[in-house]
Image: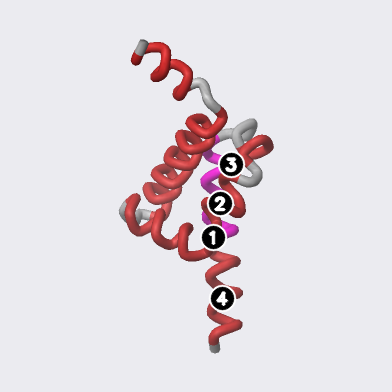
Amino acid sequence: NSNKMSEAYTSSATYRQVHFAVMAIEASAKRANVSGREMHDRLKRQGLISRRLFRYYDVLHTQSLDWVVADTLETLSNWEHEEMEVTS
């Protein structure tokens, strides 16, 4: 019974989205030469995990991980830059 529950969970859309986001965060961290925690915190602070990785999962997960990493880092840089302009 717990096997069926585990199987149902791992085939769920939520699981796939979380798995995709974790892969994107870790790969982005590696490319940016920062820890996974730091990358997660920066993406979360900008709302990029929910507003980008989850919201656009249907499109993003069809791209290569390399493309997703480049897009994630570019978006993060742009959003952080915009935040700095607004607060200064």
Q: Residues within 10 Å of mark 1 (few under 14, many from 20)?
A: some
Label for residue 83?
Answer: 4
Along the polypeptide, which appears first: circle 3 or circle 4? Answer: 3
- Residue lying at 65% horizontally and 44% vertically, measured from the top left: 56
* Residue 23 in the image, given as x and y percentages of width and height: 44, 38
Q: Relative to 87, does residue 71 appear above or below in the rendering?
A: above
* Residue 40 in the image, given as x and y percentages of width and height: 40, 54
Mark 1 = which residue?
Answer: 47
Give the CA separation, mark 3 to mark 4. 24 Å
Give the CA separation, mark 1 to mark 2. 6 Å
Mark 3 = which residue?
Answer: 67
Circles 1 and 2: CB distance less than 8 Å?
yes
Q: Residues within 10 Å of mark 2 (few under 14, many from 20)?
A: some
Task: Please give the range of residues in magenta.
Answer: 65-76
Q: Relative to 88, does residue 66 appear above or below in the rendering?
A: above
Please state which of the two labelled residues, at mark 1 or mark 4, is closer to the viewer.
1
Viewport quadrant of the C terminus: bottom right
Disc 3, SS = helix
Kind of residue sitting beneath label 4:
Glu
Considering the whole magenta stretch, tell me its main secondary structure.
helix
Mark 2 = which residue?
Answer: 50
